[in-house]
């Protein structure tokens, strides 16, 4: 029974991380889409290139984390 609990906890933690990373990717992709499709919606940004680049940096960060999780921890 203890082994089952450890295995369930492992699965739940890994699932939570996968969903967490995927959610951040979706959020930052949506931010880019908003900026590309309606730049006036976010009027406090004057440097659009930097704002979009920052969002893409966040996407890359979470994609890297997801890749490491899948490669090293998911069976």
Image (cartoon, rainbow, N blue to C red):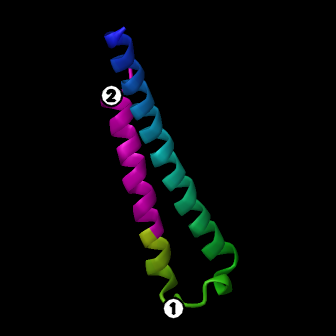
- What is the secondary structure assignment of the residue under circle 1? loop
Q: Which residue is mark 1?
A: 46
Q: Main secondary structure of the magenta part?
A: helix
Q: Is residue 30 left or right of residue 46?
A: right
- The image quarter in which residue 17 lies: top left
Q: Is residue 8 above or below residue 32?
A: above
Residue shown at 45% from the left, 57% from the top = 59
Q: Residue furthest top?
A: 1
Residue 20 lies, in percent from the top left, at 47, 47
- The image quarter in which residue 42 lies: bottom right
Q: Nearer the viewer, mark 1 or mark 2?
A: 2
- Which of the pair 1/72 is nearer the observer? 1
**Is 57 in the magenta?**
yes
The numbered mark at residue 31 is none
- The image quarter in which residue 41 lies: bottom right
Q: Earlier in the sequence, mark 1 or mark 2?
A: 1
Number of marks present in the image shown: 2
Q: Is residue 43 above or below residue 16?
A: below
Residue shown at 33% from the left, 28% from the top = 73
Region of the chain picked out in magenta, as a range:
55-75
Q: Is residue 8 above or below residue 29?
A: above
Mark 1 is surrounded, within 10 Å at the Cα level, by few (under 14), some (14 to 19) or many (20 or more) other residues, namely few
Residue shown at 40% from the left, 33% from the top = 13
The numbered mark at residue 73 is 2
Using the numbered discs, state the Cα–Cα distance from disc 1 to disc 2 in whole angstroms: 41 Å
Residue shown at 37% from the left, 55% from the top = 61
Residue 69 lies, in percent from the top left, at 36, 35
**Is 50 in the magenta?**
no
- What is the secondary structure assignment of the residue under circle 2? loop
Q: Give the quarter of the figure containing the C terminus.
A: top left
């Amino acid at each position: 029974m203890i082994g089952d609990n450890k295995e369930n906890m492992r699965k739940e933690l890994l699932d939570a991380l996968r969903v967490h990373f995927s959610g951040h990717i979706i959020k930052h992709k949506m931010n880019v889409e908003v900026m590309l499709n309606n730049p006036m919606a976010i009027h406090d940004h004057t440097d659009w290139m930097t704002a979009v680049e920052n969002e893409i940096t966040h996407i890359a960060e979470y994609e890297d984390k997801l890749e490491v999780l899948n490669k090293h921890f998911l069976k």
